[in-house]
Amino acid sequence: MAKGIDPREVKRQQQIEENEKRLKARQDITFKQLCDKCEEYSKIYNTSSKGSTARIHNYGKPLF
């Protein structure tokens, strides 16, 4: 500890800030953006993503 600064507390505070940034970014995504991303991935990963896109569209719509 240098001059009363606890490195564990500093690291903990940084982790809290990073988590808050991640949560904010996750909450800022709109349903349209989510569908667009899923459709984009389904073009790349053809086999299973189309079913996932349909499920996300059906079950995710009430959330937004």
Image: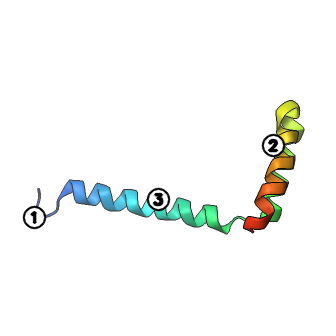
Query: What distance separates the C-alpha of mark 1 from that of mark 2?
Result: 53 Å
Residue at x 87% of width, y 30% of height: 47
**Which label sits on residue 53?**
none
Q: Amino acid at mark 2?
A: Ser
For image coordinates 16% across by 62% down, the residue present is 5
Task: State the CA–CA distance, disc 3 to disc 1.
Answer: 27 Å
- In the displayed structure, 43 sits above or below 9; it is above
Question: Is residue 55 in sight in this rendering?
Answer: yes
In the image, residue 60 lies at what x, y percent? 76, 59
Q: Are marks 3 and 1 in contact (CB under 8 Å)?
A: no
- Choose mark 3 or mark 1, whichever is in front: 3
Q: Residue at x 52, y 63 (%)?
A: 21
| Amino acid tagged 3 | Asn
Please state the horizontal and vertical placement of residue 39, each as a whole percent of the image. Answer: 87, 48
**Does residue 18 appear to the left or right of 45 in the view shown?**
left
Closer to us: 54 or 27: 54
Residue depth check, mark 2 versus mark 3: number of the one nearer the observer? 2
Q: Which mark is residue 19?
A: 3
Neighbour tally class for label 1: few under 14, some 14-19, many 20 plus, Cα within 10 Å: few
Mark 2 or mark 3, which has the lower sequence index? 3
Q: Which quarter of the figure has residue 50?
A: top right
The front one of 60 and 25 is 60
Secondary element at tag 2 = helix
- Which secondary structure, mark 1? loop
Element class at badge 3: helix
Point out which mark residue 3 bears: 1
